[in-house]
Image (cartoon, rainbow, N blue to C red):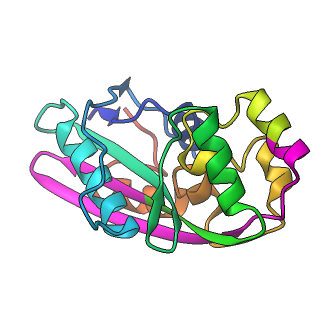
Amino acid sequence: MTLILGSGSPRRRDLLAQIGVVPHDVRPPEIDETPGKGELPRPYCARMAREKAQATEAGADDIVLAADTTVAMGRRILGKPADAGEAAQFLHALSGRRHRVITAVAVRRGARLWERDVVSAVRMKRLSDEEINAYLASGDWQGKAGGYGIQGMAGAFVPWISGSFTGIVGLPLAETAGLLQAAGYPVWKDRP
């Protein structure tokens, strides 16, 4: 039984390692991540995880794990910023406000698909220009939904969360372990 991670995120590999799960292979799929017209954040995130799982090449008995993390301000989707300017816009918008972080997980084995999404609430403190500029200069915003990573320097910007910390980082571990077990992956047993 082969476990394939359909994600290039080093954070997801690190999170899986926390529960002793090491994928046999990492195969990030190429998919279009453009939200549909009027698509809301939670359905968008679930669709992305599902499409990533389905687009990842795998054998009939292989297990594919894919996920997507989306930052949402109301109905607005804040994806991965294209550049530092867009990251700055996101951080200014999030400053002093609550937002939601949605992580959807999809596990595929053959034609079967198991899915789950986790929504967490995050409050970001009011950020000064100095804090935003220093964070942008660090480069830590790159490749992260909403333009920040709570597990890095931006953790100092977040005084309060409600929900799954690992979900905010990019892979809710309790839910992911449950999906892997449902697909027949021996999370808590000796693996071949």
Residue at point 71%, 55% (across, down)? 92
Indicate the position of residue 158 as horizontal and vertical percent values: 79, 61
Q: Is residue 95 above or below residue 9?
A: below
Magenta-drawn segment: 104-132
- Nearest the eye: 36 or 149: 36
Indicate the position of residue 15 as horizontal and vertical percent values: 59, 43
Q: Residue 22 lies in magenta, yes or no?
A: no
Indicate the position of residue 69 as horizontal and vertical percent values: 47, 53
Question: Can the viewer see residue 136?
Answer: yes
Residue at point 15%, 39% (across, down)? 61
- Magenta: main secondary structure equals strand
Image quadrant for the C terminus? top left
Q: Residue 1 vs residue 72: left or right?
A: left
Q: Quadrant of residue 64?
A: top left
- Nearest the eye: 177 or 41: 41
Residue at point 24%, 61% (across, down)? 37
Q: Is residue 155 above or below residue 162?
A: above
Total count of labels? 0
Image quadrant for the N terminus? top left
Indicate the position of residue 152 as horizontal and vertical percent values: 76, 41
Q: Residue 122 lies in magenta, yes or no?
A: yes
Q: Residue 156 vs residue 49: left or right?
A: right
